[in-house]
Amino acid sequence: MYRRLAWLILLLFSALSLAWVALPVWIIQPFRGQTPQGLAWSYQMRSWSSLATTVALLLGFALVLWLWRGSRRWWRRTLLIVILIPMAASVWFSRQNHFEWMFNPLPNPAYAKVADAGFVADSDVVIAIESNGEAVAYPVRLMAYHHLVEDVAGGTPIVATY
């Protein structure tokens, strides 16, 4: 009875550990609307994810040790290790800044003179700046995936972000 409960708790810890790092990624997706409450919830989960996943892994490891002694069959012991793998992965993932993975800067931006920028319609929204007599504009439609562009405008390094 207790062993079955321990297996169930171990599986629950594994699922919760994965969910703790996956839910913030799912809530904050590019090209999808977010609510202020969803963003706040996501960032709160993100701030607690290192502690929550580490505690889940430690408790899971304790359960695996307890279950290991009573498991005589090789496949049960293998299953115990397999259950720990996603828990360890979620501990690692909780320490990564996956929000930066979703919004990578454009590695090799290409620029066009106004006269050659036929792909930008008059109705397109742009982010525009002028620095030291040089004006540059970044169409929001083209920045929607990368969300930022590193550039130099008027001799000054800038980061345009959307």
Image (tube, helix red, strand yellow):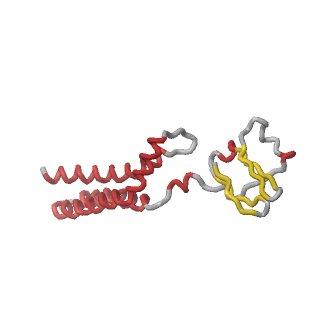
Image point (82%, 56%), residue name: 134
Q: Residue furthest top?
A: 123
* Quarter of the figure with residue 121: top right
* Left or right side of 82 for 64: left
Please report the residue visible at 73 percent of the width from the left and 55 percent of the height from the top. Answer: 109
Percent of width and height locating residue 106: 67, 55
What percent of the width, then of the height, locates residue 132?
Answer: 80, 59
Is 91 or 136 nearer to us in this picture? 136
Foreground residue among 15 and 42: 42
In the rendered image, residue 102, in percent from the top left (x then y), is placed at 55, 52
Would residue 146 be seen by someone viewing this image from the given angle? no
Q: Is residue 157 above or below residue 1?
A: below
**Residue 46 visible, this angle:** yes
Q: Residue furthest right?
A: 115
135 or 3: nearer the viewer? 135
Residue 72, given in percent of the width and then of the height, sits at 18, 61
For residue 10, side relative to residue 133 (left or right)? left
Instruction: Name the residue rendered at 49%, 58% in the picture.
Output: 97
In the rendered image, the residue lying farthest to the left is: 1
Left or right: 35 as drawn, with respect to 87:
right
Query: In percent of the image, x 17 and y 64: which residue is there?
Result: 69
**Count of labels in the image:** 0
